Amino acid sequence: MKAVIPAAGLGTRFLPATKAMPKEMLPLVDKPSIQFVVEECVKSGIDDILIITGRGKRAIEDHFDHSFELESLLHHKGDNELLREVRSISEMADIHFIRQKEALGLGHAVLRAEKHVGDEPFVVLLGDDIVFSKKPCTKHCVELYEKYSGPIIAVEKVPRNMIQHYGVIKGKPLGGNVYSIDDMIEKPKSEDAPSDLGIIGRYVLTPEIFDSLKKTPRGAGGEIQLTDALKSLNKKQKMYAWIIEGVRYDLGNKFDYIRASLDYALMRPDIGKQVREYIRGLKA
């Protein structure tokens, strides 16, 4: 499978930090958030990745490219460990880039991947959604696709006061946290939501989604909504939802960003102990 990572959003929720820097390059400690997403692809056995970018996103391309000056400097300094880490970023996968020339939403961004994907199923991962889990979330989604032979949409249980920020599914449980999808609603009011299962940034889709996107009118926010296209396609093609395992962070949300930064720092063998002691000191 190929992977598509839409990363063309303006990051307005993180202004002014994102005025001159892509939101996907905001780091957790010392690693840009989009690198976590690419690494999830690689750990899931996917090494052909298309990143959808926009104006002002050149830093993403530069991050996954070789930096000969930096590598030469590290080589001459004898910092071989850091040199290996820097080189591994550009060598972990075949990464391609294409621009979304108009800010017309997630559905439009996915449509830009049609020529690259061709007539094969593919994975979509949002560039500012990361999931910490034992088994990579994408790998689990691909395995479910192989089992059910239909598109897989990752979901999580969402507090009712946040449901209006999500696409929400209506479905029947099949066991193993898998649901057969009957319907989807994009950003419903709390009282109109058919469930508390909100769609997050992990999908396994089939190429039929492209024709559906082409026929989808602009929806919420004047954008082409991926959920609207999936809702339409669901009338012709059976789809499934899976409640993810692990912890998911929406890095466009300031609190989630801080939470992810702390959680990742605590996992790190180099600084985890210091961070834990610092937090304990704050409680005192």
Image (cartoon, rainbow, N blue to C red):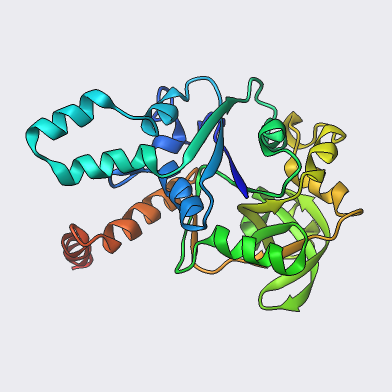
- Residue 258 rendering spot, x and y as whole percentages: 37, 51
The residue sitting at the right extreme is 236
Q: Is residue 196 visible?
A: no
- Residue 6 rendering spot, x and y as whole percentages: 59, 37
Residue drawn at (38%, 40%), measured in percent from left and top?
91
Q: For residue 265, which quarter of the picture?
A: bottom left
Is residue 10 found left or right of 73 in the rendered image?
A: right
Residue drawn at (79%, 52%), measured in percent from left and top?
185
37 and 64: which one is in front? 64
Viewport quadrant of the C terminus: bottom left
Figure check: 170 above or below 2: below
- Residue 240 rendering spot, x and y as whole percentages: 76, 63
Residue drawn at (33%, 57%), measured in percent from left and top?
264
The residue sitting at the left extreme is 77
Q: Is residue 178 visible?
A: yes
Figure check: 120 above or below 264: above
Number of dots carrying numbers:
0
